[in-house]
Image (spheres, rainbow, N blue to C red):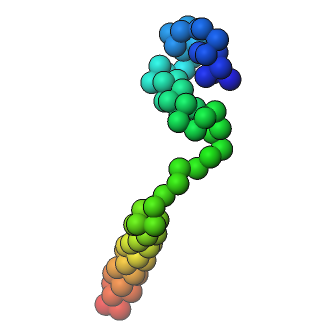
Amino acid sequence: MIVELLQSGRSIKEVSSEYKLNDSMIRRWRREYEIKSGDFSKKKELTPEQEELKSLKKELREIKLERDILKKAVSIFSKSDI
């Protein structure tokens, strides 16, 4: 709707003040709208390498979380043995 207002001739400043939105957010929406030909539901296609990197980053995050939990558990159990 915001992008359509811009396309109808309204300025970013007008729309921004009327709807209390940040100018940069409106510009980003317009850019995404133009890139995706008006369909915001399209997801950006990732290359297989990008997919693998995303998967590996997620796995690393999970492993770090598990490691931190185990460190805390060891710390707690080693204190209670004394």
Horizontal side, residue 2 vs residue 66: left or right: right
The residue drawn where x is 59% and y is 15% is 6
Spot occupied by residue 16 in the image (x, y as percentages of width and height): 54, 14
Spot occupied by residue 62 in the image (x, y as percentages of width and height): 45, 72
Q: Is residue 16 above or below residue 32?
A: above
The residue drawn where x is 62% and y is 46% is 42
Q: Nearer the viewer, residue 27 or 37?
A: 37
Q: Nearer the viewer, residue 48 or 63?
A: 48
Q: Which quadrant is the N terminus positioned in?
A: top right
Q: Which quadrant is the C terminus positioned in?
A: bottom left
Spot occupied by residue 55 in the image (x, y as percentages of width and height): 46, 69
| Residue projecting furthest to the front | 37
The residue drawn where x is 40% and y is 66% is 49
**Could you tell me how many numbered marks the image carries?**
0
Q: Is residue 21 visible?
A: yes
Q: Quadrant of residue 17?
A: top right
The residue drawn where x is 46% and y is 67% is 48
| Residue projecting furthest to the bottom | 81
Q: Quadrant of residue 4?
A: top right
Q: Is residue 17 visible?
A: no
Q: Is residue 36 above or below residue 7?
A: below
